[in-house]
Amino acid sequence: MVGLIALFALTSCAHVPGTANTQVPTLPATALNHITVQLADMPSADRLALDLTPTDGQLATLLGQPQLAAALTQAGRLGGSYRVFAFAAPEPSAYNVTVRATIEIDAFPNAARAADWLSARAATLAAMGAPQSLAAPGQQHAVRLQVTTAGDTAATTAVLSVRESNVTMEITTIFVGQGPSIADAERYAALIDDRMLHPTP
């Protein structure tokens, strides 16, 4: 029987590599597919379950908040990438592993517009718990963490929201293991951060 749902607030994740004190260039939407998480970055048991470049309306629907399409349009979203990676090994072995990771990354005309979108999106994530500031990565960042326990097994749903310059990312991971973990969400954010500083032409 599923136990009590607990919300864990992370007040410091300073060990996450980031670029909070580094000048990040303004990136065009065409760079997003190069800087986002790739299948080669994932564990070998993972598969790319979904790979989209959604319109504003499609993205809002994917996020489960169709009303946010207007906020995306108002912020001048230039484009984005939406990828879902799923753990493909047999279910009994799905332990101490991230079974699903959703990587959404979007470009806006400038940092202010990207911040506007992050604020609009944050207001719809209240069900995942109050946002907590992170030491890194990003010029804006928040994490929401929800853990459901059943016996000695914990299922952690983590949402990491980050803005770097004119780009926002929302990384959602579902981890099944002996305790809560957002390690993979942090790792994916660090990968994207690094690629923003060294974009592929």
Image (tube, rainbow, N blue to C red):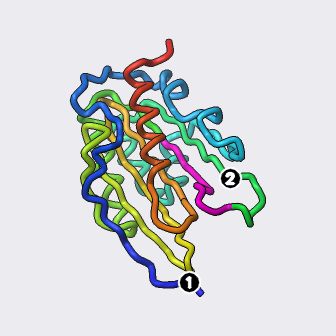
* Residue under pointer 2: 87
Separation of residues labelled 2 and 1 (CA atoms): 22 Å
Q: Amino acid at mark 1?
A: Val
Q: Amino acid at mark 2?
A: Phe
Q: Position of residue 3 (x, y in %)?
A: 51, 84
Q: Sequence-wise, which precedes: disc 2 or disc 1?
A: 1
Q: How many marks?
A: 2
Residue 73 as seen in the image, left or right of residue 50: left
Q: Position of residue 101 (x, y in %)?
A: 56, 50
- Above or below, 79 relative to 174: above
* Residue under pointer 1: 2
Furthest-bottom residue in this view: 1
Q: Main secondary structure of the magenta part?
A: strand
Q: Secondary structure at mark 2?
A: strand
Furthest-top residue in this view: 201
- Above or below, 14 relative to 179: above
- Above or below, 170 relative to 122: above
Q: Position of residue 20 (x, y in %)?
A: 25, 34
Residue 158 - label: none
Q: Quadrant of the N terminus?
A: bottom right
- Above or below, 33 relative to 184: above
Q: Secondary structure at mark 1?
A: loop
Foreground of the two, 31 or 179 = 179
Residue 64 as seen in the image, left or right of residue 97: left
Q: In this picture, which residue range is highlighted in magenta? A: 94-104
